[in-house]
Image (cartoon, rainbow, N blue to C red):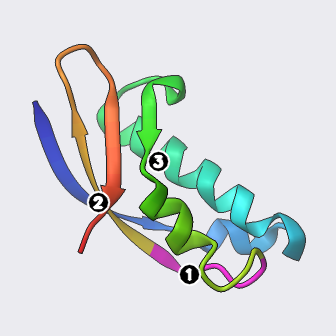
Amino acid sequence: MEERVITVPLRDAKDAPKPERAGKAMKIVRSDLAKHFSAPEDDVNLDESINEEVWSRSRSKIPSKVRVRAAKFEDGVVEAELAD
């Protein structure tokens, strides 16, 4: 098992229209973790805590970055949760 803490920048999501920023941010988190762990995006499982952090101030006022603790298991699945 491989485990890392990664800071995912969400500044690219600010280019999206305001009502779509939170959804775009979640896609960025998923794709960034897939890139760092060399896994397909379908194998990246995000915890509810990441979703709650991104949506905490509504869909248009997303945070600029998110710290995530992620682990890749032997079967290739990546599980991520919000780092404290």
First in sequence: mark 3 or mark 1? 3
Q: Quadrant of residue 74?
A: top left
* Left or right: residue 81 compared with residue 69: right
- Which disc, if any, is residue 63? 1
Kindly indicate the quadrant of the structure image that contains residue 57: bottom right
Q: Measure the C-alpha gap from mark 3 to mark 1.
A: 16 Å
Mark 3–mark 2 contact, CB under 8 Å? yes
Q: Secondary structure at mark 3?
A: helix
Q: Amino acid at mark 2?
A: Ile
Question: What x and y, as percent, mark residue 19?
Answer: 88, 70
Q: Quadrant of the N terminus?
A: top left
From the viewer's perspective, is residue 65 above or below residue 46?
below
Determine whether the residue tagged by mark 1 lies in a helix, strand or loop. Answer: loop
Q: Residue at x 26, y 67 (%)?
A: 83
Q: Which residue is mark 2?
A: 6
Q: Amino acid at mark 3?
A: Asp
Residue 14 in picture, x, y percent from top left:
73, 75
User: What is the magenta segment's predominant secondary structure?
Assistant: loop
Residue under circle 3? 32
In-image side of 63 versus 62 (left or right) = left
Q: Secondary structure at mark 2?
A: strand
The 10 Å Cα crowd at callout 3, few under 14, some 14 to 19, many 20 or more, is: some
Q: In front: mark 3 or mark 1?
A: 1
**Mark 3 and mark 2: span between their CA atoms?**
9 Å
Residue type highlighted by circle 1: Pro
Q: Is residue 5 magenta?
A: no
Q: Is residue 17 visible?
A: no
Query: Which residues are the magenta region?
Result: 60-65
As displayed, is residue 6 above or below residue 17?
A: above
